[in-house]
Amino acid sequence: ADLNLQEIHDTLVSVAFEAGRMIMSANPSEGDQGTKLNSVDLVTETDKAVEKMVSTRLRESYPSISFMGEETYTPGARVGPEPTFVVDPIDGTTNFVHAFPSACISLGLAVDKRPAVGVIYNPFQDLLFTAIGGQGAYMHRGAAAGHGAPQRLPLAKNPTPLAGLGSALVGVEWGSDRHGPNFEAKAATFRKLAASPSAEGGGGAMAHSLRSMGSAALNLAAVAAGQLDMYWEGGCWAWDVCAGWCVLAEAGGIVVGGNPGVWEPELDGRVYLAVRGAPSGQKEIVEEFWAVMGDHR
Ligand code: IPD
């Protein structure tokens, strides 16, 4: 049967607000923290409780739609062609644990392995981003409080048109992988993005600066809103990007692979470069970025 994407969107927004209340009433400093991969890959009881609430509500409302969530992921699973909710209960767990007010719930629906609906909600700022494929992306400040109105993205009052890497504010993340070739690639990329072209070693792009929202979904939403120009990450998962990808694409941005030549990455491709809308298209900007950072495969 045809999916009612608007109804799914509305359900996801209501689930996101409920998750926001759980996140805001939790106190992750009270001994509920644990780690997964290593000492910086954090998970809290709240991550697990929020995912349980979300999966229960979505299975009740949409028993025929598959579910993939960060906390119940089985290694090796991929997003399939059947409609699938792709969920990160708390994207930005490190921020949540540190009370740094940049974390969100990220709720995506993938159909045919592509993002079809995206809902991202940062309860610390009562800030909501939503999109339905083909119907535009919206940002709503004060959404749960019922203040203001959704603003369509990109905003009419947008920053200077994006000309290239040399005038870009670029989102990057350390992620939780802190050793080996992946770590070296990340550190080298950050250095190249920041360095003056005349810096020792050469080849620098000297972007305006680098930023980390601490949440892949919020990085993608920031690119959609024109607050960041680009975002590069070499180790995220489908639940980190599904919702944000939908929001960004509907705002005129693109997601390509983080390595040269990958114009149409998979939803679970792990390495991504996101670029906001640009007057002459994003192709040259992507190629400039790929040339600076090189191939890390
Ligand atoms: C992480 C955040 C972080 C990114 C990692 C993600 P989590 O998600 O999005 O910014 O660098 O790749 O895994 O663990 O907070 O849900």
Image (tube, rainbow, N blue to C red):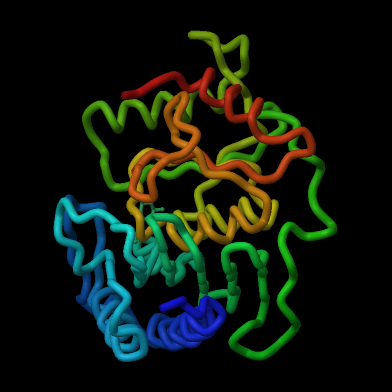
Q: Quadrant of ligand 1?
A: bottom left
**Could you say where residue 196 lies in the image, as x and y percent from the top left?**
62, 18
Looking at the image, is 248 positioned above or below residue 73? above
**In-front residue for pair 144/246:** 246
The picture places residue 84, in percent across and down from the top left corner, at 34, 68
Q: Is residue 144 left or right of residue 163?
A: left
Q: Residue furthest front?
A: 1
Residue 64 found in image quarter: bottom left
Which residue reaches farthest right? 157
Left-right relation of 4 to 37: right
| Residue 237 sits above or below residue 31 on the image | above
Eyeballing the image, is 24 above or below 115? below
Q: Whole-percent x and y of residue 10?
A: 54, 84
Residue 45 in view (yes/no): yes
Residue at (42, 28) in percent of width and height: 259
Residue 211 placement (x, y as % from top left):
55, 45
Residue 87 can be seen, yes or no: no
Quarter holding the N terminus? bottom left
Point 67% across, 56% down: residue: 251
* Quadrant in the picture for residue 174: top left
